[in-house]
Amino acid sequence: MVAGLTALSAALLAAVAHANSPSYGGSSGPTIKVDTGCKYQEYDGTGVSEAFQRGLVIHELNAASQNLVLDYLFTTKGAGMTILRNGLGSATEDPFDLMKSIAPTAPRSNSSALNFIPLPREDEYQVWLSHQAISRGVNTIYADAWSADGYMKTNGTDSYGGYLCGVTNTSCATGDWRQAYADKIVKYIQDYQAQGIAVKYVGFLNEPDLNTTYASMQSDGRQAADFIEVLYPTLQKAGLKTQIACCDGSGWQQNRERLTGIQEAGDEDKLGLVTSHGYSDYPSYPFNTSKHVWQTEWSTFDPTNYAWYSGGDGFQSDGITWANNIHNLFAVSNANGHLYWWGAANTTDNQSLLFINGTSEVRVTGRLWAHAHFGKQFIRAGAYRVDATVTGSSALNVTAFENTDGSTAVQVINNSNDTLSVTLQGLNFRNGAQTWLTNNQHNLTEGHAAVQRGHSGVVAKVPAL
């Protein structure tokens, strides 16, 4: 195997190699030392969602554009993502932008059997999308509910917040609906199972700290634990291997508060995954948990921006910004997985990585190429993040991951206005080093970060902004 260096510019550079390099001598520029003997968290992957019927938008593209979108998202032609987050519906109907429930009509009582219907339009084309994604190498389906059905909640609607009837500090004339909600989630997973799709994780909350005009349900940590105590045995009784994910808080601090409540209730062991978004509070520290942690939704909402680096108003949605966001998530917060919001959508802001216009036009953003440097072309299942330290420059952000085959991917982000001659040490470059560059002129272009051997490592020129 060779070393691989991915550079995102400013530049994001990536390299791949075996540990324990012979000694070479470097440049006068910054030095990156990789230590594969110092391992941190396991890598689970990157991903997106097409909830709220964006799977339908992809499905309606002509064949060439449809394949282009799917390949850009899920193959090494693009982002190489391996996780798909589907929306578990709660609406009574399904005009565009809503996700219909599989139990839209209230039963006679909270203890009556739910009135299940088949997956509406094959779950708003999420079944079709799941098959397409899996055929391109996606290995994890995460199903998440934004809310319980309205008749199960304190406010009688699946929108505008409200709480699940039966959890702490709720009082509903219709009684406790926790078991009914758990039964609905189990049926949804079974419906996917019948389609040959395994749902690995299931969530029952989305941004439970918020009250929104669209599907939403509020919950604190104690209330989340109240439902987990019902959902967990219900999944087990049904013989499902699906694990519970919680709680998709709107930001890192908001989710930490809910995780703490679950821990204090003694129910952390029932979780398979801790999930949070990056909106209200950026990922900036590790959670105090032994469970794997994913950032499961994050985007920006400013006007349409395709740039890698715009140097202007689009900076928060620039590709270079998202390269740094993903770096911080893995290197600072020790997360195991990163999911953007929509992968492709007919939107006029930056909620998606790919913009769709009509049935044929597809435009790619710099944000997609930032994700590609952290995708499966370089980091694969079972990889671990390893130590990577930088000396000689504060402009570089560096992450490194060792794969199970002994290869190592190193992502180098140059946030300066200067091309930097960077020496990479600590790896075995006996078979050479491969490089990939993304900046305003290159989209994951192989070989454009010039590499040569020095006396203490390999030297790569990482371009400026």
Image (tube, rainbow, N blue to C red):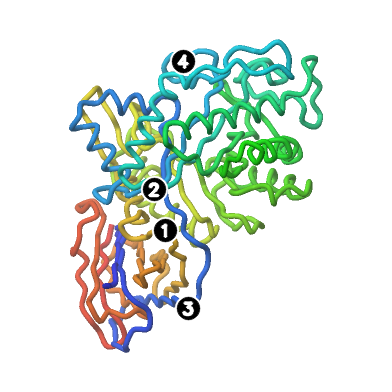
Circle 2 is placed at which residue position? 82
Q: Check contact, mark 3 vs mark 4: CB within 8 A.
A: no
| Residue drawn at the location 34% of the way across and 27% of the way down | 348
Say what amino acid the circle numbered 4 marks. Answer: Asp
Q: Amino acid at mark 2?
A: Thr
Q: Where residue 186 sits: x, y (%)? A: 59, 32
Structural distance between the alpha carbons of marks 1 and 3: 19 Å
Q: Amino acid at mark 3?
A: Gly
Write the residue at 59% across / 30% down: 185
Q: Is residue 182 left or right of residue 439?
A: right
The percent coordinates of residue 353 (x first, y second) are: 34, 39
Give the side of residue 269 with respect to residue 171, left or right. Answer: left
Counting residues from the start of the chain, the first of labels 4 and 1 encountered is 4
Q: Position of residue 218 (x, y in %)?
A: 67, 30
Element assignment for label 4:
loop
Residue topped by disc 3? 37
Residue type at mark 1 is Ala
Q: Determine whether 111 is above or below 141 in the image.
A: above
Q: Which residue is mark 4?
A: 94
Residue tagged 1: 381
Judge the density around disc 1: few (<14), some (14-19), many (≥20) Cα neighbours within 10 Å.
Answer: some
Q: Quadrant of residue 237?
A: top right
